[in-house]
Image: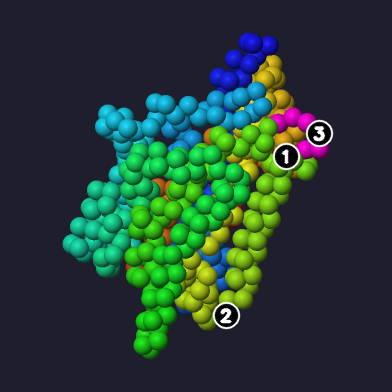
């Protein structure tokens, strides 16, 4: 019995289901960003997507972004603290060596973060600068100011430049704004750990919920200010778009900090919620973990319903691309953190499944494996919880998720080449991308697609 308890306490709580959530969040962000490619503007029409489908993806994109900021706060707090399991499946943190109180510890942390993401960020942005040149895939031209702006992005200060007018070309690696903003928050993380842990230490469930609601309300303030500015400007008779104004708020690191702190709080909360984390017993369907999971699912249905209903009511004169058009998208679309509490509920519930699964595996030892983990999850959250945990922990999702950073960062280069190819074969994007005379690579790209798209025995006949 003593050996078993020692084994359980040393067991690491692995976030397989959380990794599954991260996969779907990354997929959603990539699909939403790819609207620029799929919404092929050809004489005012759409080649690949209907207005409703495009509008749905654009609506839900900001929800994925907000979810990811919260998930990042959760994941980094989990990753930089050593996790152990108690006999009841409670996730305990050993934080004695991870308080970041010394310069050397903070320096190692910062270097580690840079080594993890900056090489891919630098290479992917450089690729974007390359493929947009007229001699290559040439759909865009950059002025000297554009070049300066993008070089400053490589210095990781893009988020702090949000208030400056963007050059015509903007950030060539558009999706990377999210990573630039996160990088600034990651820099602040060592200074946040101790005060955040002290702020939430010893809270009852009710007090924790109140504090989380307070953080969510704080996260709404920048967007409320944005709406107020738009309202005041519109009252003067201005009828233009507010894209530049919106993008002066969206990537600003201090405006996204409350979401990140909410994620940190969720990770810390798992250390002080024994009733929620306890596994075993009967009646899994009505245990606390099950109700949290059902609440998260209900919230997810509400978010999807919001996006679907909004897309269905878009007028035919609306543009899918311009989400700042309140007449088409409504004022709530300007509030990035509108569903922040739903994101928190989903992350917290799914993390509980991972803790229960890890405790089950530790109890059973090497001979128990996945079956013991699934049984522990079922006892904690019922059959529905087990099914969700198995789905999110699917091995394929875990493997693809390992490449999530690369998929996210290199998507822009791939989409730029696809846009250029479509122009070269005279299919869409006529008003956003010009066909270039120096495009031998287009022909190679086009032939490669033709060869891989058909059976070698039938290509000649067709």
Stretch in magenta: 279-284
Q: Secondary structure at mark 1?
A: helix
In this view, the mark in front (3 or 2): 3
Q: Secondary structure at mark 3?
A: loop
Q: Earlier in the sequence, mark 3 or mark 2?
A: 3
Q: Residue at x 72, y 26 (%)?
A: 371
In the image, taking residue 316 as reference, residue 243 lies left or right, namely: left
Q: Which residue is mark 1?
A: 381
Say if the magenta span includes residue 68.
Answer: no
Q: Residues within 10 Å of mark 1 (few under 14, many from 20)?
A: many
- Whole-percent x, y for residue 201 in the image: 50, 39
- Whole-percent x, y for residue 379 in the image: 75, 33
Q: Residue at x 49, y 77 (%)?
A: 326
Up-down relation of residue 231 to residue 243 (above or below): below
In the image, taking residue 316 as reference, residue 107 lies left or right, namely: left
Q: Which residue is mark 2?
A: 315
Up-down relation of residue 240 to residue 264 (above or below): below
Q: Which residue is mark 3?
A: 282
């Amino acid at each position: 019995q003593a050996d078993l308890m020692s084994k359980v306490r040393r067991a690491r709580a692995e976030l397989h289901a959380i990794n599954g959530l991260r996969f779907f969040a990354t997929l959603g962000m990539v699909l939403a960003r790819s609207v620029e490619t799929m919404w092929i503007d050809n004489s005012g029409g759409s080649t690949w997507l209907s207005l409703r489908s495009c509008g749905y993806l654009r609506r839900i994109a900001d929800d994925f972004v907000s979810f990811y900021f919260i998930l990042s706060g959760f994941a980094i707090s989990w990753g930089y603290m050593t996790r152990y399991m108690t006999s009841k499946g409670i996730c305990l943190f050993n934080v004695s060596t991870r308080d970041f109180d010394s310069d050397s510890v903070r320096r190692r942390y910062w270097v580690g973060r840079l080594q993890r993401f900056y090489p891919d960020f630098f290479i992917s942005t450089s690729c974007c600068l390359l493929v947009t040149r007229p001699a290559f895939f040439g759909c865009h031209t950059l002025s000297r100011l554009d070049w300066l702006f993008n070089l400053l992005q490589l210095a990781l200060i893009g988020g702090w430049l949000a208030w400056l007018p963007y050059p015509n070309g903007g950030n060539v690696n558009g999706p990377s704004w999210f990573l630039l903003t996160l990088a600034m928050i990651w820099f602040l993380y060592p200074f946040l750990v101790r005060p955040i842990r002290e702020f939430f230490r010893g809270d009852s469930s009710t007090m924790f919920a109140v504090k989380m609601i307070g953080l969510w309300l704080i996260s709404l303030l920048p967007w409320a200010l944005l709406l107020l500015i738009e309202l005041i400007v519109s009252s003067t008779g201005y009828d233009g778009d507010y894209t530049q104004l919106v993008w002066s708020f969206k990537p600003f690191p201090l405006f996204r900090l409350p979401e990140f702190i909410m994620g940190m709080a969720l990770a810390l909360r798992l250390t002080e919620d024994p009733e929620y984390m306890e596994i075993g017993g009967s009646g899994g369907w009505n245990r606390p973990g099950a109700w949290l999971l059902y609440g998260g699912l209900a919230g997810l249905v509400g978010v999807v319903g919001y996006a679907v209903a909004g897309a269905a009511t878009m007028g035919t004169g609306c543009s899918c691309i311009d989400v700042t058009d309140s007449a088409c998208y409504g004022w709530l679309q300007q509030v990035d953190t509108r569903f922040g509490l739903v994101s928190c509920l989903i992350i917290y519930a799914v993390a509980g499944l991972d803790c229960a699964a890890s405790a089950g595996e530790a109890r059973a030892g090497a001979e128990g494996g996945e079956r013991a983990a699934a049984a522990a999850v079922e006892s904690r959250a019922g059959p529905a919880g087990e099914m969700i945990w198995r789905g999110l922990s699917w091995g394929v999702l875990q493997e693809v998720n390992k490449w999530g950073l690369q998929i996210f960062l290199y998507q822009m280069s791939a989409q730029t080449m696809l846009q250029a190819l479509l122009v070269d074969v005279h299919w869409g994007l006529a008003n956003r991308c010009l066909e270039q005379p120096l495009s031998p690579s287009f022909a190679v790209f086009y032939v490669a697609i033709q060869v891989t798209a058909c059976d070698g025995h039938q290509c000649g006949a067709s």
